[in-house]
Image (cartoon, grey):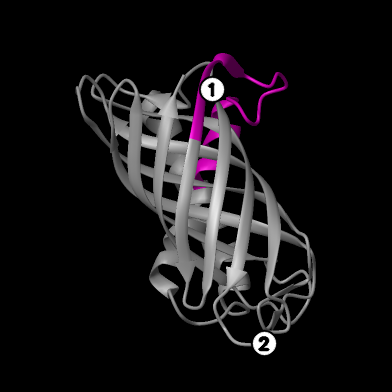
Amino acid sequence: MHSSKTFFSSLLMALFTLSLLFSTQTQAKQENNDLMSFAILGAIGSLGLACYEGKAPCSLSPGVDTNKLTFSLDMGSDRTTDQLRLGIGADWKEAVFETPSWEIVGRLEGSLHRWSSTLDNPKNESGYIIGITPVFHYQPKNYTYTPFIEMGGGPHLLSDITIENEYKSTQFQFGSIFGLGIKNQNFEISYRYLHISNAGIEMPNPGTDFHNIHIGYYF
């Protein structure tokens, strides 16, 4: 019964994510296509699984544990645009999905980003982004140093409609992440890719793709 449920959950997620991927990917700029695909597929698929399982962030209750918090720092760039991101997150109270050997866990994370251009005389030299992101970790169990794949996505708001020389049409954007890392009881460190675009809400829709070093501290 459980395997049947998992199969149909995966099938539904695949169909939904593929349809949304094609509708958004054709509008965004064509660099970083593979990472963008992983980020968008992973974010929507993870949220879809959580909703299917009736777990946070799709449950009626917030489902977060404010006694298990993560403070994080991301530093990276998109070509000539540098980014510094500060995040604070609260863990989900229970796993989204688990087997005896692996699990999907995560947190709800709020973030503040500061970006700045290294170009001479861009249309907009710097700005801020605020975001809310459900973050999911796909990981094995019972490791002292646990490797994980990180996926997630959520709404982001730009302080200005232009980033550097790119007019993004809407201040409301979606941010999708894909990462690979390792963690123990106190820290996590990973490579984290962040794709920001408006999912075709309005054109033009240039994507912004930050490649970051991510460090998180649990407290």
Q: CA distance from mark 2 to mark 1?
A: 44 Å
Is residue 29 in the magenta section? Answer: no
Q: Tag on residue 14?
A: none
**Percent of width and height locating residue 98:** 36, 24
**In the image, is residue 56 above or below residue 112?**
above
**Percent of width and height locating residue 186:** 34, 23
Whether residue 52 is visible: no
User: Which stretch is magenta?
Assistant: 45-71
Q: Residues within 10 Å of mark 1 (few under 14, many from 20)?
A: many
Residue occupying image coordinates x 23% and y 24%? 101
Whether residue 128 is visible: yes
Residue occupying image coordinates x 79% and y 75%? 169
Question: Which image quadrant: the N terminus?
Answer: top left
- As helix, strand or loop, the secondary structure at mark 1 comes to strand
Residue occupying image coordinates x 70% and y 64%? 127
Residue occupying image coordinates x 60% and y 26%? 56
Name the foreground residue: 173 vs 128. Answer: 128
Q: Quadrant of residue 64?
A: top right
**In the image, is residue 134 above or below residue 96?**
below
Q: Residues within 10 Å of mark 2 (few under 14, many from 20)?
A: few
Look at mark 1 in the image and give the residue it sits on: 92
Question: Which amino acid type is marked by label 1?
Answer: Trp
- In the image, 34: left or right of 116? left
The residue most toward the bottom is 120
- As helix, strand or loop, the secondary structure at mark 2 comes to loop
Question: Which amino acid type is marked by label 2?
Answer: Asn
Q: Quadrant of residue 54?
A: top right
**In the image, is residue 139 above or below residue 41?**
above
The residue most toward the top is 67
Name which of mark 2 and mark 1 comes first in the sequence: 1
Look at mark 2 in the image and give the residue it sits on: 121
